[in-house]
Amino acid sequence: MLIARVQRIWSSLSATNEASPVTQHKTLRKIVGVSLVKNEEHFIGWALSNVADFCDEILVMDNHSEDRTSEILSALTRRHPHIRVITVDDANKTHGHVEHLAGTDTWVFGIDGDEIYDRDALERLRPRILAGEFDAYWRVYGHTIHTRELNLDDQTARGYIPPEARSITKLYNFAGISSWHQPNHERLHGKDMVFRDGYHWELAYNFWQHDSWQQSDCRCLHLCFAPRSSHDGRGDPRANPVDVKKSRRVVKRLTKHLVRWFDRDHDIKKNYKYQHYALGDIVSEPISGFGRPVDLGDATSHESEVEAMLTDDSWLPEAIR
């Protein structure tokens, strides 16, 4: 009887150990995608379709798009029910939609309308994240090509890569912070987060430091120099929401006009995308795994137009030709 009693106690302890907080932590982990859009008809279908299987849910915040973005998003939500679309009035006050996730076992993935991720690579990355491989890090940076030429038939891209050019992947471990309250910020912008013990801003895993472009499980085509909508003109790339906000300040606007009189290249020198993305040597890399717009089938109705636009390299700004 004593032996049987010991066996029952041991079984009970084993069962308790199996249901430990560590085990529960791993099974409850999830990935939430967040996308802020305004007039993104050219690439948003491609961008979101490529990350749909990587994310457990995706929140899309539409800042009153006036092109075909809403139509494309509606088609995507029918195909992917875990994509939810809401309308927001101010792009610079959207961080509140994710701050409630602070302190939870959630990886938050920011996806812009000009960021095309390798869906095959993300299929390999997802189980690594859910297994806790990157839990010791606050953020993960992927490989990025800031694209200046794209050949969809040959499946190659040319552009600028890290470390000279900045990586733009926004993949954050919200379990590493206790709060991130910034009511007047764009989603996932700013540094007012409160870190838990053992975490800090510089705690980052950089895929581009560990793996080559072809081996990386997190890689992105950044179409930052291309027009993202029929509402965009040819020329310098679209400004970020925070830069648009700054440009509306009266003093800032007057100063900018004055400086332009003396420096004709002022806009090029101050353009965020030229400053951070058009740096270093131009490299060429294969892009199998990214697919192409026409792969979307009936998700959108103008994939061929988008591909034709990308084939015509006249969209490349004069400043970086």
Image (tube, rainbow, N blue to C red):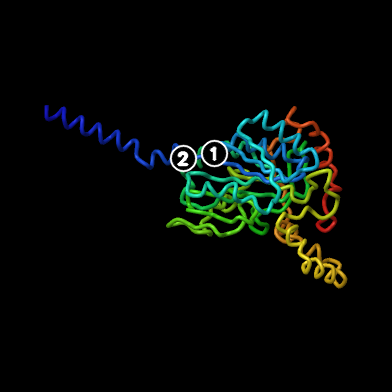
Circle count: 2
Marks 1 and 2, how far apart at CA: 9 Å
Side (left or right) of 12 relative to 60: left
* Residue lying at 79% horizontally and 38% vertically, measured from the top left: 68
Q: Amino acid at mark 2?
A: Ala
Binning the other alpha carbons within 10 Å of mark 2 as few (below 14), some (14 to 19) or many (20 upward) gives: few
Residue at the extreme left: 1
Q: Amino acid at mark 1?
A: Arg
* Residue 88 in picture, x, y percent from top left: 69, 46
Q: Nearer the viewer, residue 18 or 221?
A: 18
Kindly state the secondary structure of the residue where label 2 is placed. loop
Q: Is residue 244 above or below residue 17?
A: below
The secondary structure type at the circle numbered 1 is helix
Image quadrant in which you'd find residue 254 = bottom right
Dot placed on the residue nearer the N-terminal end, 1 or 2: 1
Q: Are marks 1 and 2 in contact (CB under 8 Å)?
A: no
Q: Residue 241 at x, y = what percent?
A: 72, 54
Nearest the camera: 183 or 180? 183
Q: Quadrant of the C terminus?
A: bottom right
**Corner quadrant of residue 270:** bottom right
Q: Position of residue 153 (x, y in %)?
A: 77, 36
Q: Which residue is mark 1?
A: 126
The image quadrant where one finds the N terminus is top left
Looking at the image, the residue that sits furthest to the bottom is: 262
Extreme residue toward the front, this view: 89
The image shows residue 37, relative to residue 3, as above or below, that is: below
> Badge 1: how crowded within 10 Å, few (<14), some, or many (20+)?
some
Does residue 68 appear to the left or right of 192 in the view shown?
Answer: right
Q: Position of residue 238 (x, y in %)?
A: 78, 53
In this rendering, would 223 be left or right of 141? right
Which residue in the protein does label 2 denote? 131
